[in-house]
Image (tube, rainbow, N blue to C red):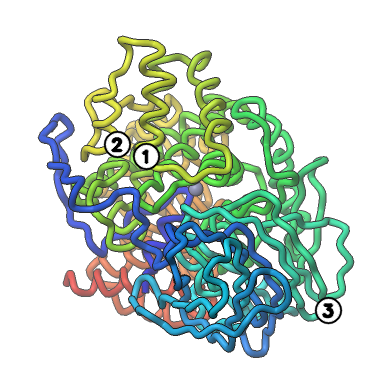
Amino acid sequence: MRVFALLLSVFFVVACSQDKKSTAAIPVDKNSTAAITVDKKAVDLSHDYFSFANTKQFVTDHLQLDLTVDFSQQELRGLAVLHMRRLDPSATDIILDTRDLHISSVRVGDGNGEGTEASYEYAQTDPVLGQALKITLPDGLEQQQNLVVSIRYRTDPSASALQWLPPVLTAGGKYPFMFSQSESIHARSWIPLQDTPSVRITYEAAIHTPPELLAVMSADNDPHTKRNGEYKFTMPQPIPSYLLAIAVGNLYFAPIGAQTGIYAEPETLEAAKFEFADTQQMLETAESMFGPYQWGRYDLLILPPSFPFGGMENPRLSFITPSILAGDRSLVSLVAHELAHSWSGNLVSNKTWRDIWLNEGVTSYLDARLMEVLFGKDQADEERVLSYHELLQGLKEVAPAMQALAPTERLKDPDESQGSLYYQKGQLFLQLLENTYGRKTFDPFLAAYFKHFEFQSISTEQFLDYLDKNLLQKYPGKFSRAQAEEWLYQPGLPADAPIPHSETLETAAQMATDWAAGEIPVKDIPMSEWSPHAAVYFIDSLPADLTDAQLSELDANFGFSQSHNAEIARAWFIQVATRRFLPAYEAMKVHLNRYGRTRLIEPVYLALAKNGKDADLANEIFTEARSKYHPLTIAAIEHSLNTANRGH
Ligand SMILES: [Zn+2]
């Protein structure tokens, strides 16, 4: 399974430990400028190696879906109609991406009538890419420019994009739930299509569900829609296939602002409404900085606890983990991140998965800017420092060739081997440009960039040329193209990389050391005045040689084991497991059963398995809890436990 690739592509803050599959600890010399030889002839960097589709011969403009959601069979079944254009007059076969689809018929026509039955076959199969569906055009369509391809099919219960949850795994416990996760290359497991971000399509859908449930999509959800099991959607803006999304469950709507609202199960609706009350203001702030929001409504869908990720930027409807419902709005930077994708990622998309830093790096920079306006510079700087530390960690774990923002070697799997560093390194690159040119120049440049490439999918090289022409050459002598190329194509961190700084985090780290050394009493640590980020930094900064009595003192005073802030709990239980602090093991088990988001639990399992004594206990807890987890989370934990066990 390509679990890690998928995980990495959608996490806001990714734990690098989740991608150890093909990486080794490699010390990075920050000052090394030894260039990696770029053999651009070896691979065509503009080619999407993760799609079979012959997009140079035919391209899709529009998709129509008519699907029945069948919970008893765990399948979607119905019709996908692709409206395609012929680019190459001599082409006779259309090749689409599929994975584990059960296809019963294919018809091709010119749009008048039902079309003609066409012959089809699986031309190629690949463990990463799935199956290439080759459709031979029926006779008589040789001169036809516009083609309509109708495919009748059903999905497999194992479809890699879909999770079918029994009622027990939902917040309410009474109704089943289904949701999709198409990024990076999983749309093909629920729709036969050209599954590459280089192709943008509009779509419309008719979705049939049990009458008591509501369907939502990455489209024009109507908050006042009649709840009857028959739902219609249109997405008038062209999007790449990885942004096709659907969810069905016992969902209700609550408005936040004129343009914004929440979809959630009734059990979490009020908490979510409180937590994300700033979303409308966030949207308006983003518009003032990056240009108009071009998607109509912006709603949030709160998923059940087993949603394996932080969030997914499905257009008009971000999918969000319930684990950031902290009760104090302290973890909403994830929403800022998903919202910022409305510009970087959704409006201007990466052309291939090799260019994913254009989505994630740019978005990470934007979300920090949003957080700064909404919650102040201190909090934004805290998040920048945490992100920087994840980057330093990532650089230790990712092979040099994959440390480039835009690797010039072919990836084996989308995102494979890059860890999460394209998030943080990309953010730092844009931060450097901001520092160099000042916000008065850089902000309008960014807004113009989004406008220039709106509704397009672009490559790193298109970005570089635009940057060169519209910023570097316009203000000569400040930053060279060679400097930009070092960021984009070389490993490690360039010498000009800015180092983020946060006084509150430094204070927290200092206090951790001072308290551990007995220099200050625990009551002098102003934990209740600190942000969760400072609390996390404090926990991470505790020296290795603490006694159980000291850990007990911390827990008694600050209640870490009982924390309902998922990030504090995560940091604490990693320490608990690493240090074998047995008094908190019961609470740790509660944590591992409460959350399904991979980031929050996988590192705790790993720490447990690696502490030298608890590998069996880790397996035992996992065996008991795994029915609550998403298959991708299960695979990630299994991978970690196996890796740890091999280490002994
Ligand atoms: Zn993102």
Picture layout, residue 181 above or below residue 341: below
> Is the shortest distance between ligand 1 and the CB of mark 1 under 8 Å?
no
Could you tell me which secondary element the residue under label 3 belongs to?
loop
> Is the shortest distance between ligand 1 and the CB of mark 3 under 8 Å?
no
Give percent across and percent down for residue 41.
Answer: 19, 48
Q: Is residue 104 left or right of residue 460?
A: right
The residue that disc 3 covers is: 211
Residue 510 visible to the viewer: yes
Q: Is residue 439 left or right of residue 642?
A: right
The residue that disc 2 covers is: 488
Could you tell me which secondary element the residue under label 1 belongs to?
helix
Seen at 72% across and 50% down, the residue is 299
Seen at 40% across and 64% down, the residue is 51
Give percent across and percent down for residue 396.
Answer: 22, 47
Image quadrant of residue 285?
A: top right
Contact check, label 2 and label 1, Cβ < 8 Å: yes
Could you tell me which secondary element the residue under label 2 belongs to?
helix
Check disc 2 and give the amino acid type: Leu
Q: Earlier in the sequence, mark 2 or mark 3?
A: 3
The residue that disc 1 covers is: 460
Give percent across and percent down for residue 252.
Answer: 80, 63
Residue 557 visible to the viewer: no
Give percent across and percent down for residue 189.
Answer: 51, 74
Check disc 3 and give the amino acid type: Pro
Q: Quadrant of the C terminus?
A: bottom left
Check disc 1 and give the amino acid type: Thr
Image quadrant of residue 271?
A: bottom right
